[in-house]
Image: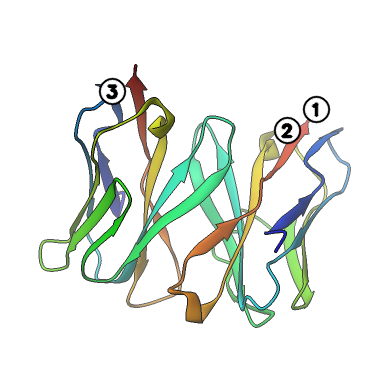
């Protein structure tokens, strides 16, 4: 049983499209992270959320604690957004982190 | 700041050899994480430290793996003896409680055990 489920697993979009990546989890959490891993392997932390919504440039992350769900949105997608996006949750009990399996995004020019 | 620094960037070693991966976190950060990434299992958290103290090592796969953080500016992840299934990218990351818990990743150590 995976405590964190991401969808879709793979996503191909045309440049300019609005993109949504979803993350659902089954445990109570204290925080949720969205990570971005580029094709070269480097990992960047995009957001840390415990409630509500955060925006950074063309990226928007939302979380609904009651529904145990988070979304990552990319507006006006660009080929440089092509990466794997990983959802990570920090449960509010215990010390273990739970990882989603990632969403591989390809944005075509 | 130079960011999280990991070494070596790449290592190829023979099965049975000891492997030591090193990490220098960002100065002032109080959390340090070791992750492993494989095609089969994705990204996994192995262990993390808070103020140099291991908080959770339940992700460490077995006794062949050990991690230490002797001081706030240095950590090691050791595999002894190494096995081919340990081949993976090992990431170190650090964060600071006061920074909104943004996690900063190193570039990874690419390990191949033959």
Q: Is residue B79 visible?
A: yes
Q: Are marks 2 and 3 on the same chain?
A: no
Left or right position of B114 against A27: right
Left or right position of B65 against A26: right
Name the residue rendered at 57%, 42% in the picture. Answer: B37
- Closer to the observer: label 3 or label 1? 3
Which percent across, then down, holds residue A104?
A: 37, 31
Name the residue rendered at 43%, 74% in the picture. Answer: B100
Does residue A62 sit above or below A1 in this rendering?
below
Sequence-wise, the earlier of marks 2 and 1 is 2
Distance of mark 3 from mark 1, alpha carbons? Answer: 41 Å
Graded by Cα atoms within 10 Å as few (under 14), some (14 to 19) or many (20 or more), the crowding at tag 2 reads some
Chain ID of residue with mark 3: A
Left or right position of A100 against B110: left
Graded by Cα atoms within 10 Å as few (under 14), some (14 to 19) or many (20 or more), the crowding at tag 3 reads some
Q: Which residue is mark 3?
A: A15
Distance of mark 2 from mark 1, alpha carbons? Answer: 6 Å
Q: Nearer the viewer, residue B81 or B25?
A: B25
Left or right position of B25 against A16: right
Q: Are marks 2 and 1 in contact (CB under 8 Å)?
A: yes
Chain ID of residue with mark 2: B
Q: Which residue is mark 1?
A: B114
Q: Is residue B59 visible?
A: no
Name the residue rendered at 43%, 50% in the picture. Answer: A35
Q: Quadrant of the C terminus of chain A?
A: top left
Distance of mark 2 from mark 3, alpha carbons? Answer: 40 Å
Q: Nearer the viewer, residue B10 or A47?
A: A47
Which percent across, then down, holds residue A52?
A: 18, 68
Residue at disc 1, secondary structure: loop
Q: Which residue is mark 2?
A: B84
């Amino acid at each position: 049983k995976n405590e964190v489920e991401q969808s879709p697993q793979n996503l191909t979009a045309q440049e300019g499209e609005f993109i949504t990546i979803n993350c659902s989890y089954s445990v109570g959490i204290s925080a949720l992270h969205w990570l971005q891993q580029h094709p070269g392997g480097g990992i960047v932390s995009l957001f840390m959320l415990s409630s509500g919504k955060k925006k950074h440039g063309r990226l928007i992350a939302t979380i609904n604690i009651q529904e145990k769900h988070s979304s990552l949105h990319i507006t006006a997608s660009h080929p440089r957004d092509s990466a794997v996006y990983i959802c990570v949750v920090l449960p509010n009990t215990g010390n273990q982190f739970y990882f989603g399996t990632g969403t591989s995004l390809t944005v075509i020019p | 700041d130079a960011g999280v620094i990991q070494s070596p960037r790449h290592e190829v070693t023979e099965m049975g050899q000891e492997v030591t991966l090193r990490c220098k976190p960002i100065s002032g950060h109080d959390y340090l994480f070791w992750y492993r990434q494989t095609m089969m299992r994705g990204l996994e958290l192995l262990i993390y430290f808070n103020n140099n103290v291991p908080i959770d090592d339940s992700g460490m796969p077995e006794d062949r793996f050990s991690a230490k953080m002797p001081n706030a500016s240095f950590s090691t992840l050791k595999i002894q003896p190494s096995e081919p299934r340990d081949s993976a990218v090992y990431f170190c990351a650090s964060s600071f409680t006061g920074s909104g818990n943004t996690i900063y990743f190193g570039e990874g150590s690419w390990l191949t055990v033959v």
